Structure formats: C-alpha cells, structure tokens
C-alpha cells in the first residue's frame, strides 16, 4: 500500500513538473499569436507607417488621417489581431472623420521586430508617442490632451498601460480581463498560475487611474464571450463604478463583439471624447 501511494505521488509530481516546464517554456506562444503583413494588404489599408526603434528593434505602427484636428485614438488590437486589421472598422464613420487613428502593433506583430511582453509593449508606447507628436507637428504637451485609447481583449491591457503611464484619462475597452493572472488561474489553476511572467494587471492599472481622478472608461463585453468570461469585466465595473460605464452585449462572442453592436461601440467612443 505504501509503495502504491509513493508511486502515485511520484506520478503526480512528474505530471506537475512537466506542466510547469511547459508553461515556463511556451506561455508566450499561448498568449501571443503574431503575424506579418502582405505588401498588398498594407497598400489597401491606406495607413501611413510610423517608424521608431526600441530595445526590441525596429517598430512600425500605422497612422490614418494624420491631418485630422480631432481626437487622436491609440488603437490596440487583441492577441491574434494585427493593428491594420482594425483600420476598416473606423472608416466611413462621419463622427470620426476629423479624428486621427494610430494603430499600434506590438513587438513581433506586423512589421515590428522583437518579442512581445508587458515591458516591451510599455517601451514601444513610450517611444512611439514623441515620434507621433513629431509626425503630427505637435509638441508632446499639445498631443497629450487629445489622446484617447481603444483596446480589445489583450489590447485593453495595452490601452491601460498607455493610460496609466502617459496621463491619458479616457478610453474604450472591449472585453478586458481583470488580470492575466486571474485568467491563468482560471485556465491552469493554482499554483501553476504563479509561473506566469506576462503579468498584465488591468485592475491595478484602473485603481491607479481612479486615484489620480478625472478618469472615464467605457467598457463593453459580450455575454457569451468564450475566451474572456464576462465576469472578468463585470468584476472591474463593480469595483470601479465611478470610473467605468459598463455595457453588456447579449449573445456576443469574443471575436465578434466589435461587429455585434457597432452602434454601441461608436456611442461609447463619443462618450469619452
């Protein structure tokens, strides 16, 4: 009997160790799904490249309507979406015609070099903003009040990094999670979730924004989201009622939330102008 217990314990220990090694080695592949661009796709988008360099190497984000005098939207896509994939979403919307759209690719995505991580994304935003100000013929202090963020899924976490670190006070978040650790705990349980080293923490970022005051977030989530459960953003809305205006789209899935109720998305953008 003791031998059976000992062998069973060793078996489960080996399984746990194997899972731990897999998570340590491959968690980046589980979180990020970068893809490049075909030249023809870039031409069709009509967006202009914005080049800058970080410790990750050459980075390229994309600007549409750089001559616009309205809001400057920093747009952050999800983990399986390239920045230019969202360009068409904001086209031909009359209320947005005077706005500038900056579609930010993460390291390794699109035409960017390097590897994605919270720190790499933070650095990319930090270097991109003064480059953007120069491209728009603005001083950084003149650009800052015009900035708003728009982020979907992982992009909501990137958007909150931009808000937290660069004094941006308003934005629209689509299907955000509370924290990457809470997602990891849901997927692999404890203690394996403690091995996570890509620690995006939206709750902590919103807490800091709330402490500074004058922050307004429009948050939208689909009731049938199969990737990031709606409960993740509902928890944020409950914890920060003075910051978050919360909307649930009935029947909407994760990758279709943007098109399920496009009117709500555009109204939410108008609410943070």
Image (tube, helix red, strand yellow):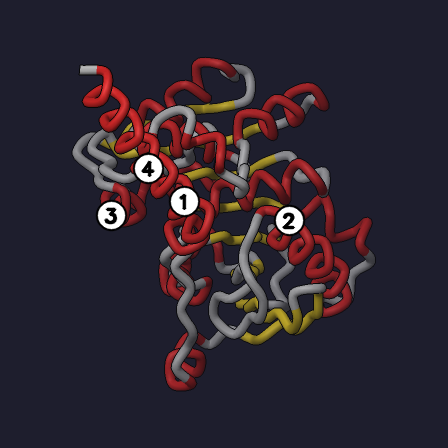
Q: Quadrant of the N terminus?
A: top left
User: Where residue 66 appears, x then y in whole percent?
Assistant: 61, 68
User: Where residue 188 appears, x then y in whole percent?
Assistant: 33, 33
Distance from disc 3 to disc 2, alpha carbons, whole Å, reads: 29 Å
Q: Which tag, 3 or 2, sits closer to the chain's start?
A: 2
Q: Reply above or below: 23 against 212.
A: below
Name the foreground residue: 268 vs 206: 206
Distance from disc 4 to disc 3, alpha carbons, whole Å, reads: 40 Å
Distance from disc 4 to disc 1, alpha carbons, whole Å, reads: 14 Å
SS under mark 1: helix
Closer to viewer: mark 4 or mark 3: 4
Name the foreground residue: 159 vs 258: 159
Closer to viewer: mark 3 or mark 2: 2
Count of numbered marks = 4
Say whether residue 16 is visible. Answer: yes
Neighbour class for label 2 at 10 Å: few (<14), some, many (≥20)?
A: few
- In the picture of the structure, the residue carrying the numbered disc 3 is 256
Q: Reply above or below: 105 against 246.
A: below
Q: Residue furthest bottom?
A: 40
Q: Which tag, 4 or 1, sits closer to the chain's start?
A: 4
Tell me which residue sits at (38%, 38%) in the image. 17
- Answer whether labels 4 and 3 touch (C-beta < 8 Å): no
User: Where residue 156 appears, x then y in whole percent?
Assistant: 48, 41
Label of residue 119 in the image: 2
Closer to viewer: mark 2 or mark 4: 4
- In the picture of the structure, the residue carrying the numbered disc 1 is 23
- In the picture of the structure, the residue carrying the numbered disc 4 is 14
Q: Which tag, 3 or 1, sits closer to the chain's start?
A: 1
Which image quarter: residue 84? bottom left
């Amino acid at each position: 009997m003791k031998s059976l217990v000992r062998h069973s314990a060793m078996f489960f220990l080996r399984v746990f160790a194997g899972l731990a090694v897999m998570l340590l080695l491959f968690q980046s592949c589980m979180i990020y799904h970068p893809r490049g661009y075909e030249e023809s796709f870039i031409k069709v988008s009509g967006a202009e490249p914005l080049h800058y360099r970080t410790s990750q190497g050459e980075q390229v984000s994309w600007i549409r309507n750089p001559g616009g005098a309205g809001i400057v939207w920093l747009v952050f896509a999800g983990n399986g979406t390239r920045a230019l994939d969202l360009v068409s979403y904001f086209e031909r919307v009359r209320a947005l015609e005077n706005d500038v759209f900056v579609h930010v690719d993460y390291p390794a995505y699109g035409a960017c070099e390097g590897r994605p991580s919270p720190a790499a994304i933070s650095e990319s935003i930090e270097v991109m903003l003064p480059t953007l100000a120069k491209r728009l013929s603005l001083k950084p202090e003149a650009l800052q009040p015009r900035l708003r963020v728009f982020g979907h899924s992982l992009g909501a976490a990137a958007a909150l990094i931009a808000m937290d670190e660069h004094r941006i006070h308003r934005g629209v978040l689509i299907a955000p999670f509370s924290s990457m650790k809470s997602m990891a705990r849901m997927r692999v349980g404890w203690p394996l979730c403690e091995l996570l080293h890509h620690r995006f923490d939206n709750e902590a970022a919103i807490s800091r924004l709330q402490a500074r005051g004058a922050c307004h977030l429009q948050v939208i989530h689909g009731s049938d989201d199969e990737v990031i459960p709606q409960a993740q953003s509902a928890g944020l809305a409950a914890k920060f009622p003075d910051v978050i205006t919360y909307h649930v789209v009935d029947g909407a899935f994760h990758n279709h939330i943007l098109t399920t109720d496009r009117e709500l998305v555009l109204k939410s953008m108008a609410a943070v102008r």
